[in-house]
Image (tube, rainbow, N blue to C red):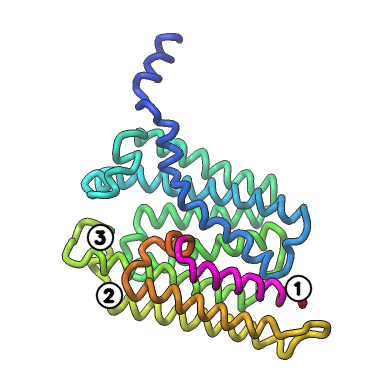
Amino acid sequence: MGERSVLVVEVLPRGFGLGVLRAARPRQWVKNVLVVAAPAAAGELVSLHTALRLGVVFLLFTAAASAVYLVNDALDVEADRAHPVKCRRPVAAGEVPVSVAYGAGGVLALAAVVGGAALCNAMTAALLAAYLAMQFAYCLRLKHVLVVDLAVVTTGFLMRAMIGGVALSIPLSRWFLITTGFGALFMVSAKRYSEAVQMAGRKGETRVLLTEYTTGYLRFVWQLAAGVAVLGYCLWALESGSAPNGSSLPWRQLSMVAFILAVLRYAVFADRGTAGAPEDVVLRDRPLAVIGVVWTAMYGMAVADL
């Protein structure tokens, strides 16, 4: 028994635990903050119960997303090893054995679904299971299908935005779904467009499907998605009419200005072909951050009818 334990320790690469954590891509976890979107839109962020439930949902979705990253890297290990950048990923670099990546991914996926059912409700577990099934199908096949790949990634973001409302049994409005869905498509297609611009003349150094898209088509998609997202948001804002009783200003209508400015600012990076890492654009661009703070304040006052 002791010899077997020593053998296991020797077989596993040194520091593989940290490698598993890196393979789960902690930098991407910021995307899961979207779980607060639906409760925030409904003005349901004021209670301790809501905050605790959303914390749990964040952890569950992070586990599910990490499971997808681990399985994806295990499936693509050979292709990643031939890639100039992806070869540094822990699985491709040999820091994490392929079998460990599959095992850790499976455990995290199961924990997310079971945790959703035990700690939230059946619909939360169902949404997490649907997300995992869709993402695993994406890893295996759908990422090689034109247009479908954009739809799957966009739906993943939409599910993030929906799950907070599902866990708290908050109805999801049509304007919320339209604005969030097309806003996600805008960012996803802008990312693909940026990747296509940056890989010009370097086939095989990034995702293969990009060679099937034209930059003109991807530009059309992100421009269309941006337009629909802005339209959906404006219709939500105008639906309330004038300022409600007791409100000094029509904050919903005024928040349209900040929302449109945010879209226009992000479109600058999309047009330049530098929106390949949306989290970097959002977190590092100061003007966009200021616009975001202003929009958040206006939106909060609109939801609270202040």
Seen at 57% across and 78% down, the residue is 258
Seen at 25% across and 48% down, the residue is 79
Q: Earlier in the sequence, mark 2 or mark 1?
A: 2
Q: Position of residue 242 (x, y in %)?
A: 73, 90
Q: Position of residue 58 (x, y in %)?
A: 60, 51
Determine whether, in the image, residue 295 is placed left or right of residue 49. Answer: left
Residue range of the region highlighted in magenta in the rendering: 284-301
Residue occupied by mark 3? 208
Tag in front: 3 or 2: 2
- Camera-side residue: 51 or 250? 250
Circle 3 SS class:
helix
Circle 1 SS class:
loop
- Image mark for residue 291: none
Determine whether, in the image, residue 203 is placed left or right of residue 238. Answer: left
- Magenta stretch: residue 219 in it? no
Q: Position of residue 166 (x, y in %)?
A: 66, 61
Circle 2 SS class:
helix
Distance from the alpha carbon under mark 3 to that under mark 2: 14 Å
Residue occupied by mark 1? 304
